Image (tube, rainbow, N blue to C red):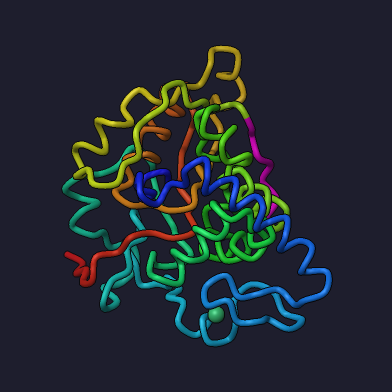
């Protein structure tokens, strides 16, 4: 995403240092104590991922949904129908799929994963993503994680999208292409911006360097990110890949923001 994290949500250097210390402490404690649910902090016993209570509240995205954008419909209009958004404002990518709605539980998972070094959550999140994106992954030649700018990568120490892509690749097969898509411009956080401002903010932020164009030419690619809000980031990434002559670009995210009611037309 890098879209939803606000300046207030993004950790300061002090918060990062505190997170690193907490992660070190957690590692020490985990040797003696069972892991905790990343959402409610309940002990998980021998389990991993979410506690049963939070699991029951997580909102998985299932069909029926818009064939193009993957936005869930309130009733089944039949196969292949598109949402109003997909027709009025079609994205550069072909199809988008998401494992869950971005709600309180999903936010706790994503924030724990991204800002508290809970890399142990990647296999579980990747499993849900592989399930949600199975039709995309069956046809894919490779996965492309949405890249971070090097400064943010340095601060966070890992790219959450690359960790998810690695988990999906291990389950579903397509290899991860690292370094093919590059973030050439650091962009301010997207929160607080409207749809047009978000698109403007990330315009020209991504490119495929000339020496990497052969790696994407004619390929069916799946862009991987943690959260989809307006879709501006993945749309800009898809445009960069298509300019480098990628054959086809789909999008697979862990969570997406969904407005309450969607009616097919
Ligand atoms: Zn819980």
Q: Nearer the viewer, residue 30 or 53?
A: 30
Magenta-colored segment: predominant secondary structure: loop
Residue 178: x %, y % from top left: 64, 32
Residue 172: x %, y % from top left: 67, 55
Residue at 46% x, 21% y: name it: 184
Q: Quadrant of the C terminus?
A: bottom left
Residue at 40% x, 72% y: name it: 63
Q: Is residue 192 above or below residue 112?
A: above
- On whether residue 231 falls in the magenta region, the answer is no
Which quadrant of the figure has residue 202?
A: top left
- On whether residue 173 falls in the magenta region, the answer is yes
Residue 40: x %, y % from top left: 52, 77
In the image: residue 41, left or right of residue 120 = left
Q: Is residue 69 visible?
A: yes
Q: Which residue sits furthest right?
A: 31
Q: Is residue 147 above or below residue 169?
A: above
Q: Is residue 50 above or below residue 183?
A: below
Q: Nearer the viewer, residue 1 or 85?
A: 1
Q: Is residue 142 visible?
A: no
User: Ligand 1 is located in which of the four quadrants?
Assistant: bottom right
Bounds of the magenta segment:
172-178
In the image: residue 80, left or right of residue 217 = left
Residue 95: x %, y % from top left: 40, 50
In the image: residue 206, left or right of residue 204 = right
Residue at 65% x, 50% y: name it: 20
Residue at 67% x, 48% y: name it: 166
Q: Nearer the viewer, residue 74 or 112?
A: 112
Which quadrant of the figure has residue 203?
A: top left
């Amino acid at each position: 995403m890098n879209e939803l994290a606000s300046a207030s949500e993004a950790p300061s250097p002090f918060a990062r240092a505190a997170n690193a210390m907490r992660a070190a402490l957690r590692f020490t404690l985990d040797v003696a104590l069972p892991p905790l649910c990343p959402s409610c902090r309940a002990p998980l016993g021998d389990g991993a991922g979410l506690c049963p209570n939070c699991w029951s509240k997580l909102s998985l995205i299932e069909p029926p949904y818009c064939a193009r954008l993957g936005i869930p419909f309130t009733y089944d209009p039949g196969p292949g129908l598109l949402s109003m958004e997909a027709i009025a404002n079609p994205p550069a990518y072909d199809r988008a799929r998401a494992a869950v709605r971005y709600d309180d539980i999903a936010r706790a998972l994503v924030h724990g994963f991204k800002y508290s070094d809970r890399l142990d959550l990647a296999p579980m999140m990747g499993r849900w993503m592989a399930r949600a994106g199975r039709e995309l992954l069956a046809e894919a030649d490779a996965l492309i994680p949405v890249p971070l700018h090097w400064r943010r990568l340095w601060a966070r120490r890992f790219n959450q999208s690359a960790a998810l892509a690695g988990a999906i690749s291990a389950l579903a097969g397509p290899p991860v292409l690292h370094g093919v898509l590059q973030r050439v411009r650091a962009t301010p956080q997207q929160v607080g911006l409207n749809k047009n401002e978000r698109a403007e903010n990330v315009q020209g932020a991504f490119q495929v360097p000339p020496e990497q164009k052969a790696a994407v030419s004619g390929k069916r690619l799946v862009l991987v990110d943690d959260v989809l809000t307006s879709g501006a980031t993945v749309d800009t990434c898809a445009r960069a890949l298509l300019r480098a002559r990628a054959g086809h670009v789909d999008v697979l995210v862990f969570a997406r923001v969904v407005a309450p009611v969607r009616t097919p037309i």
